[in-house]
Image: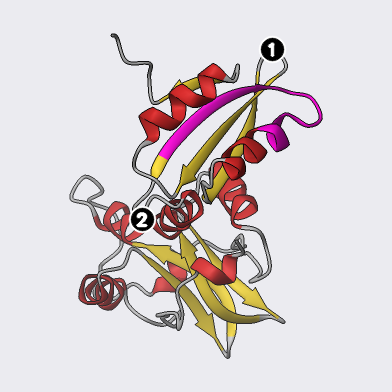
Amino acid sequence: MLVRDVMRHPVFTVGPETTLEEAYRFLLEKGIRHLPVVQDGRLVGIITDRDIRLATSHLNPKGPCPGCTRVEEVMTRGVVTAHPLDPVEEAARVMRERKIGCLPVLEDGELVGIVTGIDLLDGLLRLTGVTEPSGRLEVRLPDRVGELARLTGFLAGRGVNIHSLLSYPEDGDYVRAVVRVNTLEAHLLAEALRREGFEVLWPPKKPW
């Protein structure tokens, strides 16, 4: 999944000459939290609802006047951006490391979209297949060649279709596989996997 698959477009923007009051009203009207600042078709900054609130807070009596201060005086410059063809996990990594809530998306210098933390969560839901009726299996596998193929081969042999499969490494030379399958009888499938020697973490084993 790429950034272009989850980004929002077209993008709401303001100019650097917009007042903080106008920008904040626009944020509320559109139900958004981030506003790229564009001048002559070029991204020059970004401002958020938090930026405006902090700048105009009653706790900051010497702060700027909302109706007469322009966005360019408060906005963040040197904006971190993404490209439409970036993988979503790379966008998530950048946002997490930089501790930022969005990434404007540029293609050939043109602002073509914006991706936020909510957009990435929506992408994660699609990747995991949780939005479709399905059963969930979680299996710990030895981190060696052929183990994932052994798992998928077992499922295929029982006529089970895989909707999604995510895996990640664990400490101790193991890999955890999270599988969404086209059956709601996950408990029965889990027991069959256990009989074949797989370590099934979910669904948990039923007490008999």
Residue pointed to by mark 2: 131
- The correct choice, above or below, for 129 with respect to 201 in the image is below
Q: Is residue 200 visible?
A: yes
Q: Position of residue 89 (x, y in %)?
A: 61, 50
Q: Residue 190 falls in which quadrant of the image?
A: top left
Q: Nearer the viewer, residue 176 or 78?
A: 176
Q: Position of residue 93 (x, y in %)?
A: 61, 45
Q: Name which of mark 2 and mark 1 comes first in the sequence.
A: 2
Please identify the quadrant where the C terminus is shown: top left
Q: CA distance from mark 2 to mark 1?
A: 32 Å
Specify the farthest residue to the front: 158
What span is in magenta?
A: 136-150
Residue pointed to by mark 1: 172
Specify the farthest residue to the left: 58
Q: Could you tell me the amino acid type at mark 2? A: Thr
User: Circle 2 sits in a helix, a strand or a loop, which is it?
Assistant: loop
- Residue name at image x 31 percent, y 71 percent: 20
- Residue name at image x 44 percent, y 80 percent: 11
